[in-house]
Image (cartoon, rainbow, N blue to C red):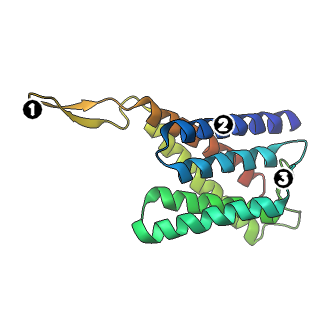
Amino acid sequence: MTVMSAAFALVCLITAALHLVRLAVLRDDVVGEASHAAMGIGMAAMFSPLGDPVPRLVWTGVFALCAAWFTVLLLRRREAAARHHVVGSAAMLFMIGAGTHAGHGVPAGGIGLGSVAAIVLAGYFAWHAFGCLDRLTPRALPGLVVSSGGAVALAPARAGDRTAAGAHLVLAVAMSVMLLGMV
């Protein structure tokens, strides 16, 4: 399990780095990219067989702030992306509260409310992963392009959109694995 945990930690760190690069280069969704980067780093720390060098209180503050920010955004705009960030931040807070570390899960004692919550959250992230897979297909994310002559055609998806979908897929799968490990 240590090798698998280390592999997941490395993949989460690489994904976090990708979000940081996107944040610096695109400067489009700064808070969203920062939130995804924090989630990737936080999950890497949870998966790490060496333990988490960052105190739980710091992680709690980061994800509570993310949850609050995106809850306000969700209430104002009702955007699906804001809802996803709220669920992701809540899941991170749930795992921090449960003291999750790779392969340790929730303390023994049968299936309780925490296990049910972990299963529901894992289901959400599995569903999100399938949505990300769909966005990775060549036909995904077409846009309408109008030529100077007035002709309308479908343009292929931008590479950045697929990059984001791939990064979201990685984090969604890692989150599902970690949550199922809590059951």
Q: Residues within 10 Å of mark 2 (few under 14, many from 20)?
A: some
Q: Residue at x 83, y 47 (%)?
A: 102
- Image quadrant in which the N terminus is located: top right
Front in this rendered view, residue 155 or 7: 155
- Image quadrant in which the C terminus is located: bottom right
Q: Residue at x 31, y 36 (%)?
A: 142
The residue singled out by tag 2 in the image is: 17
Q: Secondary structure at mark 3?
A: loop
Q: Secondary structure at mark 1?
A: loop
Give me the C-alpha separation between circle 1 and circle 3.
Answer: 56 Å
What type is the residue that disc 3 sits on?
Answer: Val
Percent of width and height locating residue 101: 84, 52
- Looking at the image, tell me whether mark 2 or mark 1 is earlier in sequence order: 2
The residue singled out by tag 1 in the image is: 150
Judged left or right of residue 107, residue 136 is: left
- Looking at the image, tell me whether mark 2 or mark 3 is earlier in sequence order: 2
Query: Which quadrant of the view contains residue 147?
Result: top left
